[in-house]
């Protein structure tokens, strides 16, 4: 990795860690999604942010919109598939939030949750399965 890119990543990591406690639901969901998206590249800088973001999810979950919850569930499954279980402890809280916002789910959000459910089922996590019948009418 070029030295300039490594320096930029460290600066980004520091800025995100400092700002995490002030992030709203959308900002948290976007950074978690982006971290999961690059997880296959071995980018340890973004992955190091996940514990701080997991703490913030708990604080902003009541403000999350349907797509944000779906994106975090997708990211949790993607990260778990890569060996990072940071967000698995949040599944019960996120599952509860899905029940509250399911009427606002788009087909894309439902697809993300179905994919996450299937991926997490591969590793023995069954908590999302109970949601699927309630979401079926949203497709």
Image (cartoon, helix red, strand yellow):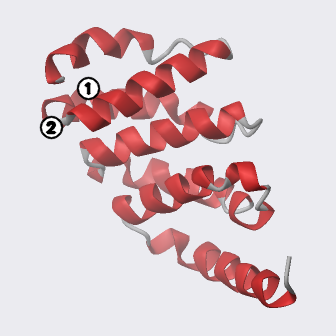
Q: Residue furthest front?
A: 2
- CB contact under 8 Å: marks 2 and 1: no
State left or right for residue 8 relative to residue 28. right
Nearer the observer: mark 2 or 1; the answer is 2
- Of residues 73 and 87, which is closer to you in this image? 73
Q: Residue 128: x, y in percent?
A: 44, 18
The label shown at residue 99 is 1
User: Above or below — where is 55 with respect to 110?
Assistant: below
- Quadrant assignment for the C terminus: top left
State left or right for residue 30 relative to residue 75. left
State left or right for residue 62 relative to residue 29. left
The label shown at residue 1 is none
Q: Residue 41: x, y in percent?
A: 75, 55
How packed is label 2: few (under 14 Cα within 10 Å), some, or many (20 or more)? few
Point 53% across, 77% down: residue: 19
User: Above or below — where is 101 with respect to 127?
Assistant: below
Q: Residue 15: x, y in percent?
A: 62, 82
The label shown at residue 104 is 2
How packed is label 1: few (under 14 Cα within 10 Å), some, or many (20 or more)? few
- Distance Cα–Cα, label 2 vs label 1: 10 Å
- Mark 1 lies on a secondary structure that is helix
Point 41% across, 66% down: residue: 27
- Mark 2 lies on a secondary structure that is helix
Point 39% across, 28% down: residue: 113
Q: Residue furthest bottom?
A: 4
Point 50% across, 30% down: residue: 91
Say which label, 2 or 1, has the lower sequence index: 1
- Of residues 49 and 110, which is closer to you in this image? 110
Q: Quadrant of residue 32?
A: bottom right
- Quadrant assignment for the N terminus: bottom right
Q: Quadrant of residue 125?
A: top right
């Amino acid at each position: 990795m070029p030295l300039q890119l490594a320096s930029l990543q460290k600066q980004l990591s520091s800025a995100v860690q400092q700002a995490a406690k002030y992030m709203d639901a959308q900002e948290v969901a976007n950074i978690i999604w982006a971290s999961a998206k690059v997880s296959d590249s071995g980018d340890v800088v973004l992955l190091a942010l996940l514990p701080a973001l997991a703490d913030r999810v708990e604080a902003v979950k009541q403000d999350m919109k349907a797509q944000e919850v779906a994106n975090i569930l997708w990211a949790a499954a993607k990260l778990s598939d890569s060996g990072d279980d940071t967000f698995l402890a949040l599944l019960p809280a996120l599952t509860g939030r899905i029940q509250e916002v399911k009427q606002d789910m788009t087909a894309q959000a439902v697809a993300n949750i179905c994919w996450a459910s299937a991926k997490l089922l591969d590793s023995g996590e069954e908590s999302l399965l109970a949601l699927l019948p309630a979401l079926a009418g949203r497709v």
